[in-house]
Image (cartoon, helix red, strand yellow):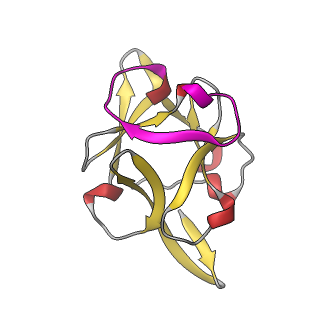
């Protein structure tokens, strides 16, 4: 994800620290390396796994379907809260509720920027690039 901070483009990465998932300045550590693994029998659904911690990106079931849904990293358990699809325009969409992975806008450009589930709007804070 690239943001503009003081009119200068800054590469920002999805970062895992314990159970916390946030946006941080890209630094090349394993905490910022994620892999997509297809869910067996579900051709367009994936588990998103951090390569450093081996934890899965998890859309908290207790806050499903609400803007501001908690997103965390938890042990991979195969439940639907850990199932994602690649949406249009670079979005990552939670399968259970159709909400997009969203970098919370009020802290844009700051290390530790919170990520959440939010209604898909096509905004730049919902666009993710995989390499």
Q: Is residue 102 left or right of residue 49?
A: right
Give above or below for 122 relative to 58: below
Q: Residue 66: within the magenta?
A: yes
**Figure quadrant of residue 107:** bottom right
Give the residue displayed 65% in from the left and 30% down from the top: 98
Is 55 in front, or is 34? 55
Give above or below for 65 relative to 54: above
Spot occupied by residue 19 in the image (x, y as percentages of width and height): 38, 44
Is 75 in front, or is 4? 75
**Figure quadrant of residue 106:** bottom right
Spot occupied by residue 67 in the image (x, y as percentages of width and height): 70, 40
Q: Residue 79: within the magenta?
A: yes
Is 25 in front, or is 66? 66
Give the residue displayed 70% in from the left and 33% down from the top: 66
Boundaries of the magenta span: 62-80
Q: Residue furthest right?
A: 121
């Amino acid at each position: 994800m690239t943001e503009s901070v003081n009119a200068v483009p800054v590469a920002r990465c999805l970062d895992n620290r314990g159970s916390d998932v946030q946006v941080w300045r890209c630094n090349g550590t394993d905490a910022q390396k994620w892999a997509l693994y297809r869910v067996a029998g579900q051709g367009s659904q994936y588990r998103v796994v951090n390569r450093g911690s081996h934890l899965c990106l998890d859309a908290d079931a207790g806050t499903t379907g609400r803007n501001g849904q908690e997103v965390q990293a938890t042990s991979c358990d195969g439940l639907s809260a850990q199932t994602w699809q690649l949406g249009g325009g670079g979005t990552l969409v939670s399968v259970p509720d159709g909400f997009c992975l969203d970098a919370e806008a009020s802290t844009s450009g700051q290390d530790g920027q919170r990520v959440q589930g939010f209604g898909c709007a096509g905004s730049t804070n919902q666009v993710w690039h995989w390499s």
